Amino acid sequence: MEKQQPRPRMVVTLSALFALLTGLWLLGGGVWLVAIGGSWYYPIAGIVMLVVAWLLWRRSAAALWLYALLLLGTMLWGVWEVGFDFWALTPRCDVLVFFGIWLLLPFIWRNLVHVSLAIPALVVTLLISAGILTWAGFNDPQEIHGTLPTDATAAAQSSDIPDGDWPAYGRTQEGQRYSPLKQINADNVHQLKEAWVFRTGDLKQDNDPVEITNEVTPIKVGNSLFLCTAHQRLFALDAATGQEKWHFDPELKTDPSFQHVTCRGVSYHEATPDNAAPDVVADCPRRIILPVNDGRLFAINADNGKRCASFADNGELNLQSNMPVTTPGMYEPTSPPIITDKVIVIAGAVTDNFSTREPSGVIRGFDVNTGKLLWVFDPGAKDPNAIPADEHHFTLNSPNSWAPSVYDAKLDLVYIPTGVTTPDIWGGNRTPEQERYASSILALNATTGKLEWSYQTVHHDLWDMDMPSQPTLADITDKDGNTVPVIYAPAKTGNLFVLDRRTGKTVVPAPERPVPQGPAKGDRLSPTQPFSELTFRPEKKLTGADMWGATMYDQLVCRVIFHGLRYEGTFTPPSEQGTLVFPGNLGMFEWGGISVDPNRQVAIANPMALPFVSKLIPRGPGNPMEPPKDAKGSGTESGIQPQYGVPFGVTLNPFLSPLGLPCKQPGWGYISGIDLKTNTIAWKKRIGTPRDSLPFPLPFSLPFNMGMPMLGGPISTAGNVLFIAATADNYLRAYDMTNGKKLWQARLPAGGQATPMTYEVNGKQYVVISAGGHGSFGTKMGDYIVAYALPDEAE
């Protein structure tokens, strides 16, 4: 009897069609990629898949043999390109692995001719692939495994701050974000439970811009917490229970054109007979200083929430005085000011990339008790300290300072991180005055505003590489046993500049190195830039192998896009072609800063690695040089930015695939431990999963950290625990400071794009985080303040 041939099955036909379409995509895109200098893998894989499709159509089991070779070759090629990196290997093989499993299903192979050993060959190949991925999942080549010193190498530094308090944004005016509390420690932190939740009731409003954020770090003095919301509503809470004591509403009127609606924190001052007149002490002995995004500053009685009548105009100070532009939202103080015994030192953000006619980034010192203007430092003025008369104004578009500053009381110096003159991405018309203090650290005398020294971290900045975070002060013992007072200044470039805070001289070398040249028409470039030897910046340039996607399809698209952009490494100039900016505009460091344990002389950092793309748009129809009447800001820092007054507008966006995923492979976010005596990175771990970034919610955590982008910073404690939220998934996490081991995590009700803090009241230590989300970051919005503590029996 003649052997009956297997009957054709629709599923085999569909499988052949899938292989055909995949082969066409890989071949077509691969040929394009090779033509612009990319990998040969894709056209070769495309040809193989087309042959597999033809063999499946013919019902030949040779399709399984050939497919097994393709899968094995892909895995070997992937390991050759990226090593045993789970998240980097996944898009290279995920579609192929699933299709290989599909081909093993009985209703497929039973309809093929001469199957024999083809099935075992494909099974073995799939097992090899699974083994490689499993090994990669538990052996991350991006991580650094090491330990920080455990013993205090310096005597505990004296402080007049009670151990249980957190009275300033960084706990101290030195910005250390370190607490001497140790009731919660590495041994018991896993027992933390939610202690209380407070809801502010301040949620996104119809008139708000995209960039509405909840970035506050509360402060704690005595038995009260003080915090501000996105709309700068000020709350006083009972530190033990989270119950509201009072609140104050400055009645901010927002507009979609505001580039920010945010409040990172408030400041505290105590008036005493030694530093204030009797009427000031009587009126408002303890006050909260509240910045408001429309250009106002309030002094509020910390005991009852009433305005301090002796300060400025019934507790309200107008920061728009003498500004050249007073449009609400163009000048926004978003960070808490520095408070000395005599002076409030405050600066503010301006709208990035709108025009050449924007408010000044002037830094000002006001009498802390009366609000009287004492001094100015206008970075873009010929004489920065000149106080303008009533009919004159501060300098248009002076470099601004939007991040928090720090203060050394012994030296009476305030250290100001500055940004760049806006527009940011083209600077051919900038004056020498606008250039000299841009993207720098300024050391000003806090009493007089006079410049002591300055250090520039980027010359002629065309990448928005401003100083984005509060610096940190510490006294460090060098290798010769000498104590050196240093300032740590994290930069968007990934450099951590370490300077002697008395002189501004580098403690860790930061030599000038050549950088790419070839500016846009009419612009210029610095031939060199400073590169600190303590850094998280990528040492190697990105290549096509670093491109990523959810699948091989969009990874191929990302490779094509990458090779079509201008990219020659760090500081590649902006261009009409489109420039890959890496480190990106968001920065490797953002406003969260670092945490320094001054006793162990170690630091905790949370760098990011997310490229951006900038593309200059020449003036022409629809892109006028001068702003149309009633032109307003876009309400965001990304997308199309007009840059009125210069020859180009610009588009600024994260480097994303058509599916909206980053085109650079993970990780995009890390935590790391730094030994400050040796200035070396002891350990580095990825942090965060895509659980809350997927198009569909997951009811569980994912097993491997991808390393997510984040906004917010870490804190550390004497209990050898660091706490951090910040990531694009909604968690607060605790880690062992010594080795970076994760010890605990808690699910937050909304995005935690804030820096936590910790304090003690009534003998109990609490950890508090704002969980309110971030509009442009895409995390869940909310209005939560959440506190955690140990159960009573665990203390």
Image (cartoon, rainbow, N blue to C red):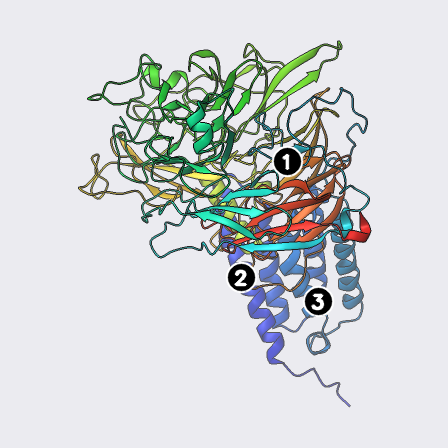
Q: Is residue 453 above or below residue 396?
A: above
Q: Amino acid at mark 2?
A: Pro
- Secondary structure at numbered mark 1: loop
Q: Which residue is mark 3?
A: 101
User: The disc labelled 3 sits on which kind of residue?
Assistant: Ile
For disc 1, the marked residue is: 165
Question: Could you tell me residue 463's position as x and y percent?
Answer: 43, 30
Q: In the image, which disc is placed on residue 695?
A: 2
Q: Position of residue 477 (x, y in %)?
A: 72, 15
> Hey, which quadrant is residue 699 in on the image?
bottom right
Can residue 578 be spotted in the picture?
no
Task: Say which of marks 1 and 2 sits in front.
Answer: 1
Q: Earlier in the sequence, mark 3 or mark 1?
A: 3
Mark 1 and mark 2 lie on one chain; the one further toward the N terminus is: 1
Front-lying residue, 639 or 147: 147
x 42%, y 13%: residue:
448
2 and 3 marks in contact (CB < 8 Å): no
- What kind of element bears circle 2? loop
